Image: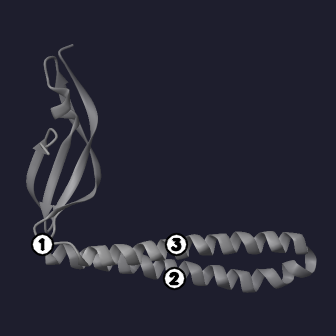
Amino acid sequence: MNTITINRPIVWKAIVTDKLKAEMHQELERAKVRLDMEIQQLEFQAKRILPDLERQNLRRAMAVRQELDDEKQKRIVSLERLSDQIRDLQELTNGEEIARGTLEGMAQVAIGDDITKILYAEIVTKDDLVVELREGRQAL
């Protein structure tokens, strides 16, 4: 066997533009709305379930209340994180590159190949269009 096909991670980077900032802001705002709705749902469940449960089994009611409070707190922390991300988004400069995620791709590896060039790949986009494909780590 002279070659083998492998899976490799591909870093997706985007060049910051006003359009990208607007899209990311909209995504973050939608995520905040979803979290707000989840918090309201947890509060509704607590009001609906806990009074009956307290009459039946106080210890179980306290445990359920704690679980609901814990879930609510997790979402509140996530909301705070989203607010921080929105603030960070406003500080991005047009033209800089940011990581958007990781994809997966396949690559051929042959005897004599430089594995460091094969294992690292990037796709760079600008306003949803691919503008560059990179292989191998870029010099720092």
Label 3 element class: helix
Q: Which residue is tagged 3?
A: 77
Left or right of 85 on screen, residue 19: left
Q: Residue furthest left?
A: 131
Q: Amino acid at mark 3?
A: Val
N-terminal of the two: label 2 or label 3? 2
Labels 1 & 2 near each other (Cβ < 8 A): no
At 14% from the left and 45% from the top, the residue drawn is 140
Q: Which residue is tagged 2?
A: 36
Q: Position of residue 25 (x, y in %)?
A: 29, 78
Can you tell which of label 2 and label 3 is closer to the viewer? Answer: 3
Which quarter of the picture shows residue 53?
A: bottom right
Mark 3, other Cα within 10 Å: few <14 / some 14–19 / many ≥20: few
Q: Position of residue 99 (x, y in %)?
A: 24, 58
Left or right of 106 on screen, residue 82: right
Q: Which mark is residue 94?
A: 1
Rounded to the nearest angstrom, the CA distance separating label 3 from label 1 is: 29 Å
Rounded to the nearest angstrom, the CA distance separating label 1 from label 2 is: 31 Å
Q: Amino acid at mark 2?
A: Asp
N-terminal of the two: label 3 or label 1? 3
